[in-house]
Image: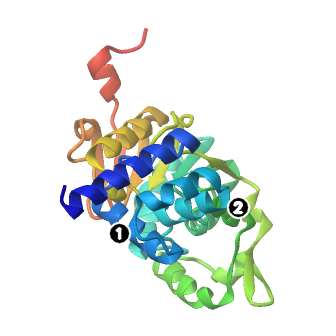
Amino acid sequence: MEQHELEQLEIDLFLEGVYRRYGYDFRNYARASLQRRMRGLMAATGHSSVIEMLPKVFSDRGFLIRVVDALSINVTEMFRDPPFFLALREKVVPYLKTYPFIKVWHAGCASGEEVYSLAILFKEEGIYDRTTFFATDFNAGTLEKAKAGIYPLDTMKKFAGNYLAGGGKAALSDYFHAEYDSVIVDGSLKKNVTFAMHNLATDGVFGEMHLILCRNVLIYFDAQLQCRAAGLFDDSLVHGGILALGSKETLRFTELADYYDMLDEKWRIYRKTGATYLAAHWGAPT
């Protein structure tokens, strides 16, 4: 067996072991990304092969945390991709304002910067008080950071620039208070946000939502897991609900594509049409 084939086999065995032992399912993550992350974990922990790490992850929950962190997707910042948030203000918020109550699911929220960005946007647009936000991730460590809402002070200059470019109407500092070398999200932004564990690879539908955001996540999944996640989003959206993906992610190659209208092509913002995929394939509910 060639070295490359052996490495792939070891990765398969390692991921299967982690899934069976702990329930974390990375088996359908994009292989090239997984391979890079596994090699980085090996280098950081002093292991010479993937399979060498398997007994360690079985016996040491502290090592499991390192594995989960290494394989998690945590690329985020306040108002990341400002034109995306500008598109939400201009093309999505006017539609959401027609609802008396709004439910939002941010899937893959990581350390929370983007869900708080969305909360700021909704507050400035006058719909925060009738919105419930559900921010989910499978990584317990990053969820705790998100709940705390504490970020390094030296990130605020970049965050403030993003905020203004995304259509901000005040000063970003109005939504934080400083403490030593950190800033803390104001409590008024947290009161309508619920953080919860949820794994797109293994868990089910997450309520009936008017808006679902999931950016910079699906690109790390293989085609099978992308379709599973898209199906979850579809089942979780009300008729006419909005699905906002990243600029590199799309519904184009899924069976759902014909059941959504494109609101913004660059930022992959979709609106679910009246006909649903499930109704079309299984018949409308009676």
Relative side of 121 to 49, left or right: right
Dot 2 alpha-carbon crowd within 10 angstroms: few under 14, some 14 to 19, many 20 or more:
some
Q: List the single residue furthest toward the top.
A: 286
Q: Is residue 134 left or right of residue 73?
A: right
- The amino acid beneath tag 2 is Glu
Give the tally of numbered discs: 2
Q: Is residue 85 above or below residue 161?
A: above
Q: Residue at the spot x=70%, y=61% of the render?
A: 144
Q: Which residue is mark 2?
A: 144
Q: Nearer the viewer, residue 284 or 227?
A: 227
Its colouring scheme is rainbow
Disc 1 residue crowd, few under 14, some 14–19, many 20+, Cα 10 Å: few
Is disc 1 in contact with disc 2, using a CB cutoff of under 8 Å? no
Residue ID at (61%, 65%): 112
Picture quarter with the N terminus: bottom left
Q: Is residue 1 above or below residue 175?
A: above
Say which element carries label 2.
helix
Dividing the image into 4 quarters, which one contains the C terminus? Answer: top left
Which sits in the foreground, 154 or 162? 154
Q: Amino acid at mark 1?
A: Arg
Where is residue 272, by image quadrant? top left
Label 1 sits on residue = 36
Residue 286 visible (yes or no): yes
Q: Residue, x 62% and y 67% (percent of image)?
A: 120
